[in-house]
Image (cartoon, rainbow, N blue to C red):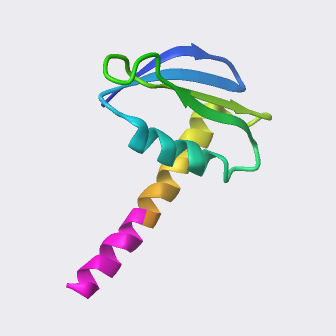
Amino acid sequence: MEFNVLEETKTRLVAEVEGEDATLMNLVRKELWNDKDVKTAAYSKKHPSVSAPTLIVETSGKEPRKALADAVARIKKDLAGVEKAAAKAV
């Protein structure tokens, strides 16, 4: 995965995420919406089989990179719980 920042301000981050698809982008987008400081969390893709998705994060004051890092940390925590539950089931 390669994260290429296209635009960045104090409250907005637009980045291309090379090597990923809708699966990860939807997970990140959905988790970003759980942050009360996030005003916009979306992604777009110009062409499904050719282009990399572009992630857009806008906040109401929180640094967008911090909001993204927090969302990823929450996702990792949730996945660790799933991994534990799956290990117990086997």
Q: Residue 79 location, x and y as percent? A: 39, 64
The quadrant of the rendering that contains the N terminus is: top left
- Image: magenta residue range: 79-90
Residue 82 part of the magenta-drawn span: yes
Relative vertical location of residue 35 with respect to residue 89 in this rendering, above or below: above
Where residue 87 appears, as percent x and y from the top left, is 24, 80
Front-most of 19 and 5?
A: 19
On the rendered structure, is 2 left or right of 60?
Answer: left
- The x, y position of residue 18, in whole percent, is 34, 24
In the picture as drawn, the residue positioned furthest to the front comes out as 48
Q: Is residue 82 above or below residue 54?
A: below
The answer to whether 10 appears left or right of 32 in the picture is right
Q: Nearer the viewer, residue 24 or 80?
A: 24
* Above or below, 43 relative to 16: below
Residue at figure coordinates x 75%, y 43% from the top left: 37
The residue at 47%/22% (across/down) is 45
In which quadrant is the C terminus drawn?
bottom left
- The image shows residue 77 at horizontal and vertical percentages of 45, 64
Q: Is residue 9 magenta?
A: no
Q: Residue at x 46, y 65 (%)?
A: 78
